[in-house]
Image (tube, coloured by chain):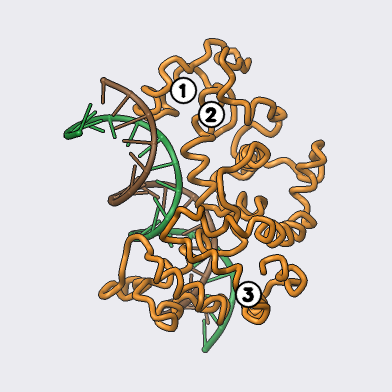
Chain colours: A orange, B green, C brown
Amino acid sequence: MGRQPCCDKLGVKKGPWTAEEDRKLVNFILTNGQCCWRTVPKLAGLRRCGKSCRLRWTNYLRPDLKRGLLNEEEEKLIIDLHARLGNRWSKIAARLPGRTDNEIKNHWNTHIKKKLIKMGIDPVTHEPLHQQSISSALTPQEMSSHPTDCPQSHATGQQELPEDDSNITSIDNFSFPPEKMSGDDQSQAPDPQNDDDPLMSYIWSDAFLDDALMWNFAAAGEECSEFGLSSSDDNSAWLLDYQELGDEDFGLACSNMNMNSLDDIGGKYI
DNA sequence: AAGCCTTTCAACCGCGCGTCG
DNA sequence: ACGACGCGCGGTTGAAAGGCT
């Protein structure tokens, strides 16, 4: 017997979410918390798959999300974490407060990957690219958009920045110790405890994750005017109404979400 | 101005894993 | 031990926006 579909395909809406659907989902979760996603659409009055609801919430509607482009520090961190973890985007996202795996994955594929290739670094292995592998690492479109991006010296293992490095300032200072750049990232991941970089040691520590949770909400509080996208985004402008939420609503939502110590943090939202 | 091409990113799909009865 | 179920993850798709000719 085959696997049961995650939702009844008939009558389930697909495609972009409307403001009304967003509103229903947010209202439901803030009132009831994140519970069984399979039942959320029915209880929230949505003609959506539970999976779709979860994705919409985690990738777009969650109030603790940061908005806007990733900054240089975040990019560096992603590159470093990718060198250790590979394409385990959720693990990487867990180390970047307010960022989602989907967002990081997209950013990697559209920005960072190209930057690394432009720098002559294989985005998969994080090793210097050889001339022939540069072409295989790039799609035909990427090749055409970077026709002269292949430094000649990479076959020697020497990294040579392009003469015009104005486009790579965000990652121009990062470097990987040789032991971090070889082989399968999972099996050969270095011992975090031995990491020389204090920042990375901290990021790899359990304490980081504890702090990250706090940062999520602190960041959301500081940037609460951003989490609903720009005010020009008519489709989501209503999200700004989050700021109008009362203590009671927020407290309930947080307690249902099993977040710790949010009574204090929650005040930053409001 | 119009059509085509490229880029971006929200959303979907299928699979694997953990949990529970 | 086994199967059903729900969730989360990573890869992929496709619509929209922006850029180019």
Q: Which residue is mark 2?
A: A115
- Left or right: residue A74 versus residue A28 is right
Q: Residue drawn 82% across and 40% down? A: A198
Tags 2 and 1 on a common chain: yes
Q: Could you give the CA–CA distance between mark 1 and mark 3, rounded to whole angstroms?
A: 45 Å
* Residue A155 shows up from this direction: yes
When the figure is inspected, residue A224 is found, relative to residue A153, above or below; the finding is below
Residue B8 sits in which quadrant? top left
Give the x, y percent position of residue A37: 48, 75
Residue A257 — which label?
3
Chain letter for mark 1, please. A
Say which label, 1 or 3, has the lower sequence index.
Answer: 1
Q: Residue drawn 59% across and 43% down? A: A70
Give the x, y percent position of residue A34: 56, 75
Q: Could you give the CA–CA distance between mark 2 and mark 1, rounded to whole angstroms?
A: 12 Å
Q: Which residue is mark 1?
A: A134
Q: Could you give the CA–CA distance between mark 3 and mark 2, rounded to whole angstroms?
A: 38 Å
